[in-house]
Image (spheres, helix red, strand yellow):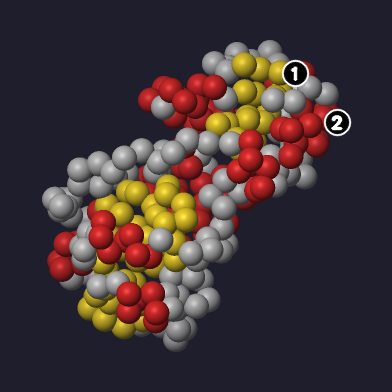
Amino acid sequence: MKFEDVCKLQQKKYRETLGHFLVEGEHLVQELERAAITQPALRASELYVTHAQSAKTYPFTTHVVTTRQMEKLSETRSPQGIVAVVPQIEASPPQPNERAVCLYEIQDPGNFGNILRTFAWFGGYRCLLLGNCVDPLNAKVVRASMGAIFHVPVEIDVSVDSIQARYPRIALLHTEGESITSSHFRSFDAYLFGNEARGVPTPVTDALDVIPFVIQGRGAIESLNVATAVNISVYELSRQEPVHHR
């Protein structure tokens, strides 16, 4: 890929057209290396490094660029001198006992990256994006995920109609309902969380067979940040032995 095209990968339309995305920073490149061990498609990644980074050995085709060129590639104020061009790969097929979490119109890249990091920490989670969600390959998402983007299967542009056929029983995180501490909470096929400001609209919940659950609190505020709600729920699901799903 030409250097000029690599620079264009900062924009979503070019990521989609060229089928690649950018990963910046030494920690994220290390996570990419780890993921490439079990995901052969990632071994086609290429690195762009400055001379300060060129003495290190990486298992990818490596190009040395000037500091000025690195500034064109970087989306951070203080470039670390290393950027990877990574091929987009499809989410792996669902696995036995894997839990599915559906996110409806999640918009904040920091929230989504945080959620992916939690999924990767606990393991065994699949993420499905419904509606107009943030691009999972957005640079801010990738950074916030701390490399979890390589370890969590993410399905994009999933239709609401297809969800019910795949997951007959869906738990909805809501402002009221049964507590997530109930053992009943662990028995569902999928877990649905909504947009940061609007939640999941009624037409969507009406189209699905959902059961509402709530994270009970004692404070004065109305609701939790969606990333916090997902993280608490995943922890609750992970406290007990996994339930065998259909």
Residue ID at (59%, 36%): 19
Q: How many marks?
A: 2
For label 1, the residue is 64
Quadrant of res 75: top right
- Say which element carries label 1: strand
Residue ID at (21%, 63%): 168
- Say which element carries label 2: helix
Q: Amino acid at mark 1?
A: Val
Label 1–label 2 contact, CB within 8 A: no
Q: Residue 232, can we see it?
A: no
Classify 10 Å Cα crowding around label 1: few (below 14), some (14-19), many (20 and above).
Answer: some
Left or right? Give the position of 177 relative to 67: left
Residue 171's spot in the image, x, y percent?
A: 27, 69
Residue ID at (53%, 36%): 88
Quarter of the picture holding the N terminus: top right
Residue 94's spot in the image, x, y percent?
A: 28, 43
**Mark 1–mark 2 distance (CA, rounded to whole Å):** 12 Å
Q: Which residue, as the protein is rendered here, is positioned at the far right?
A: 68
Classify 10 Å Cα crowding around label 2: few (below 14), some (14-19), many (20 and above).
Answer: few
For label 2, the residue is 68
